[in-house]
Amino acid sequence: MAHPQSKYADFDGLRDQAVALRQAGLSRRQIRDRLHVDNNDILNRLLEGEPPPDWTKRPNAKDDLRDRARELRLQGWTYDRIQVELGCSKSSISLWVRDLPKPEPRYTPEEHQALMQAGLAHLRNSQDEERKRVKDRAAQEIGELSDRDLFMAGSALYWAEGQKSKPYQRREVVAFVNSDPSVIEVFLAWLDLLGVSRERLGFRVMIHESADVPAAERYWADLVGVDTSALQRTTLKKHNPKTVRKNTGDSYHGCLVVRVRQGAELYRRIEGWWYGIAAGAAARLR
């Protein structure tokens, strides 16, 4: 069997052809295809000593970037700033400037920390402003609340947050517990719409025993428009030393329990209203 390189037996003649083609301005790829030389080692030997034509030499497009990066580094710029300015990678910048002295920090650790805190504060303020804009626009979308709007909202609200009777524990009472004052106000407005008089309502505060209980009682009494003496006895939640409470401070008022006296019939109507809402929603899905 012939040696794989037997086609290169006339090496000198092949080299003469390769050199002539190179001097004629052909590239390595063109010479390889013209002479059918698939072996790179052979091709290197054929073209040894012959410089490539000028047209095959690509200029180093990054020379200007490299010089500019070094100039900026000498001015004390960080890698991040140079990257933004020149639009090149940090790895390239590192290679170009690694022999240069590291610039002195522009800020002390304390100044750097203060700048970070100021930046975070500005970001949070911007986020808060955007949240407020979104909420304000959404509130305007609701517009004026009709009686039916309030009726539907209150029915759904009670079924989500109010006490419900269970098959294993039949208790048809209307009792509502929440810590959000706006939710309590919606619930009371709904009861007014239904014609439930305030004389039928009982109010009770539920709060952690370590909180400011008298302040919480005053807060809820003022919200619902009664004297603190009209509140039922406050329910205190025992402190668990193993837990870390987050519901603390002046904004913590516990929860308010609103109970409708003689509310069994009203409870049955609420349950029926909810079933009507649920059936209507299910029909829309079909």
Image (cartoon, rainbow, N blue to C red):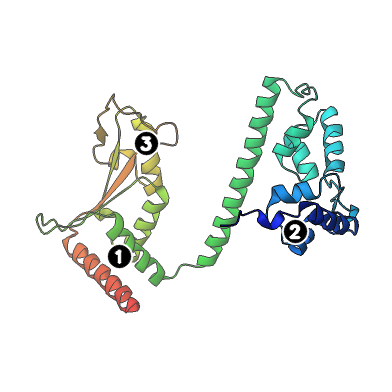
Q: Quadrant of the N terminus?
A: bottom right
Question: Which of these two is toward me, 198 or 265?
Answer: 265
Tell me which amino acid carries mark 1: Gly
Q: What is the quadrant of residue 66 in the picture? A: top right
Question: Which of these two is toward me, 13 or 77?
Answer: 13
The residue that disc 1 covers is 195
Helix, strand or loop for disc 3: helix
Q: CA distance from mark 3 to mark 2?
A: 91 Å
Residue 124 picture location, percent across and down: 60, 41
Question: Which of these two is toward me, 94 or 193?
Answer: 94
The residue that disc 3 covers is 216
Residue in view at x 11 percent, y 57 percent: 170
Residue in view at x 27 percent, y 74 percent: 279
Q: Is residue 91 rendered to the left or right of residue 14?
A: left
Residue in view at x 34 percent, y 76 percent: 285
Whichever of callouts 3 and 1 sits on the residue coming sooner in the sequence is 1
Helix, strand or loop for disc 1: loop
Q: Quadrant of the C terminus?
A: bottom left
Tell me which amino acid carries mark 3: Ala
Give me the disc on residue 32.
Answer: 2
